[in-house]
Image (spheres, rainbow, N blue to C red):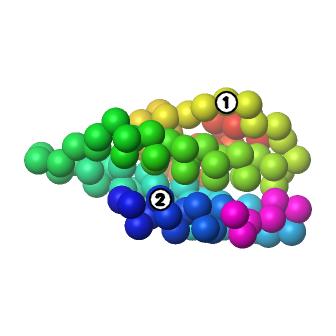
């Protein structure tokens, strides 16, 4: 989990919403965060601590902010990883899920 969060921070810092492909936010940022969250939630003996949950949500919202900026949209919300994971499971497609949540 710590490795994912650190990698996410580095990649977020290097991402330029004006020139980089927004798809990268989904594939390199949001997808791995949601996948890790789902994996942990499905494990019987593994739970995220409040600190780990907070770190994942900060990373998620950093990526959502960059994704919104890539589409010239404002981002003033805060989503939990759980909210996004549930919406993604119901929708079945990450890009459409994120677009819906962000109102794009």
* Span colored in magenta: 13-18
Q: Secondary structure at mark 1?
A: loop
Q: Which residue carries the number 1 mark?
A: 77
Q: In this rendered view, identify the residue nearer to me: 24 or 50.
A: 50
Circle 2: is it few (<14), some (14-19), or many (20+) Cα within 10 Å? many
Q: Is residue 90 visible?
A: no
**Which residue sits furthest top?**
77
Q: In this rendered view, identify the residue nearer to me: 23 or 91.
A: 23
Most frequent secondary structure within the magenta stretch: loop
**Of label 1 and label 2, which has the lower sequence position?**
2
Q: In this rendered view, identify the residue nearer to me: 61 or 87.
A: 61
Q: Which residue shows up at 37% across the image and 41% down it? A: 51
In the displayed structure image, the side of residue 50 where residue 95 appears, left or right: right
Against 30, is 77 above or below? above
Check the picture and name the quadrant holding the N terminus.
bottom left
Q: Which residue carries the number 2 mark?
A: 5
Q: Could you say which disc has been placed on residue 33 in the image?
A: none
Residue 44 appears at what percent x and percent y? 12, 46
Residue 34 appears at what percent x and percent y? 44, 51
Against 9, is 66 above or below? above
Q: In this rendered view, identify the residue nearer to me: 7 or 63.
A: 7
Q: Is residue 80 visible?
A: yes
Residue 47, magenta (yes or no): no
Q: Secondary structure at mark 2?
A: helix
Q: Which residue shows up at 26% across the image and 50% down it? A: 40
In the displayed structure image, the side of residue 94 where residue 52 appears, left or right: left
């Amino acid at each position: 989990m710590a490795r994912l969060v650190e990698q996410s921070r580095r990649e977020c810092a290097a991402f330029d919403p004006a020139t980089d492909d927004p798809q990268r936010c989904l594939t390199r940022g949001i997808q791995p965060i949601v996948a890790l969250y789902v994996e942990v939630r499905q494990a019987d003996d593994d739970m995220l601590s409040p600190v780990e949950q907070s770190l994942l949500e900060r990373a998620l919202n950093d990526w959502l902010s960059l994704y919104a900026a890539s589409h010239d949209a404002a981002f003033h919300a805060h989503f939990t990883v759980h909210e996004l994971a549930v919406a993604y499971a119901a929708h079945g497609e990450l890009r459409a899920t994120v677009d819906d949540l962000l109102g794009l």
